[in-house]
Image (spheres, rainbow, N blue to C red):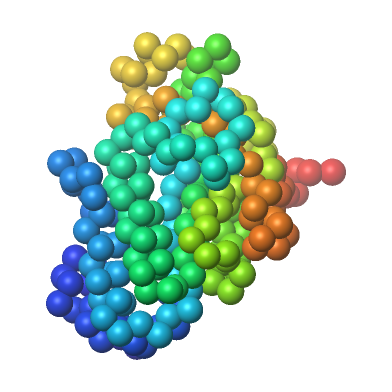
């Protein structure tokens, strides 16, 4: 096993010329003043010194699209990141794709929405529901997108072998729900009280800036490339089936 720290570029030298397929899932550093991703830059500099790689896969975020007003969003849509966090992801995408072209390496960028996993701590809305945190009222609500952690893992592996050169792929399930609908569905499955509905003004007082940033963007991801090019067959095509898959209490309540 080789150890390296993406925040310490001098530790990455041994990676060069070793890895034939690279899966890069590290997020950019949390730095409010930065608009670039120093970790991705350090990684590609190390890999480019003596590369034998055939493919790189970078796990990005659907947040690079910004607010789309609930529109359907394909991979050809121009990115419009609305947060510093998303801007750093755009920079990482560009670094990976450009470096891949220079090194003649096939690069896949996976744009990933909200990840959930019922068998992992904090992997579902259960804790949020138990805390009684509010959702936006229907007039203010936004569309949200999801992918089960197991399906995401399979997409990452498939992209290493099947991804097209310098290609962006939305990795999302088939769910079409607004955020409040998702939370109410989870409440029914877990037999918990439904969350209170509030206006945007009230939410801005009661919720954290991070939670509000997710509530300020609405889009519906198209996933045809994922299915056609990666040939991924979703094991959890909707959050309804995915939330039940590893939750024995919720499963027992289903007919």
Q: Residue at x 23, y 67 (%)?
A: 42
Residue 252 seen: yes
The mark tally for this picture is 0
Say which quadrant the N terminus sits in. Answer: bottom left
Q: Residue at x 84, y 43 (%)?
A: 255
Which residue occupies the extreme right position in the image? 255
Quarter of image, res 240: top right
Position of residue 64 measured from the top left corner of the image (x, y, whole percent): 41, 41
Is 155 displayed left or right of 244 in the figure?
left
Position of residue 241 measured from the top left corner of the image (x, y, whole percent): 71, 48
Position of residue 91 measured from the top left corner of the image (x, y, whole percent): 31, 50
Is 92 displayed left or right of 169 in the figure?
left
Which of the pair 197/87 is nearer the observer?
87
Q: Residue at x 61, y 59 (%)?
A: 151
Residue 250 seen: no
Which of the pair 164/152 is nearer the observer?
164
198 lies above or below 181: above
Which of the pair 29/105 is nearer the observer?
105
């Amino acid at each position: 096993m080789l150890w390296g720290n993406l925040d310490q570029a001098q530790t990455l030298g041994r990676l060069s010329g070793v890895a034939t397929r690279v899966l890069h899932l590290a997020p950019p550093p949390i730095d409010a003043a930065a608009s670039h991703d120093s970790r991705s830059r350090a990684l590609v500099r190390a890999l480019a010194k003596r590369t034998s790689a055939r493919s790189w896969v970078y796990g990005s975020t659907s947040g690079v699209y910004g607010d789309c007003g609930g529109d359907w969003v394909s991979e050809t849509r121009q990115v419009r990141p609305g947060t510093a966090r998303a801007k750093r992801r755009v920079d990482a995408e560009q670094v990976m794709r450009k470096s891949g072209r220079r090194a003649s390496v096939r690069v896949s960028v996976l744009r990933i929405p909200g990840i959930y996993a019922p068998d992992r701590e904090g992997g579902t809305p259960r804790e949020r529901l138990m805390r009684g945190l509010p959702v936006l009222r229907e007039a203010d609500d936004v569309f949200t997108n999801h992918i089960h952690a197991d399906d995401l893992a399979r997409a990452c592996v498939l992209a290493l072998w099947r991804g097209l050169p310098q290609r962006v792929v939305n990795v999302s399930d088939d769910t079409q729900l607004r955020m409040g609908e998702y939370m109410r569905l989870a409440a029914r499955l877990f037999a918990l009280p439904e969350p209170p509905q509030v206006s945007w003004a009230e939410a801005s007082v009661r919720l954290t800036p991070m939670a509000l940033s997710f509530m300020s963007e609405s889009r519906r991801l198209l996933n045809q490339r994922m299915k056609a090019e990666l040939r991924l067959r979703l094991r959890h095509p909707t959050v309804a089936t995915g939330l039940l898959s590893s939750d024995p209490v919720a499963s027992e309540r289903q007919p």
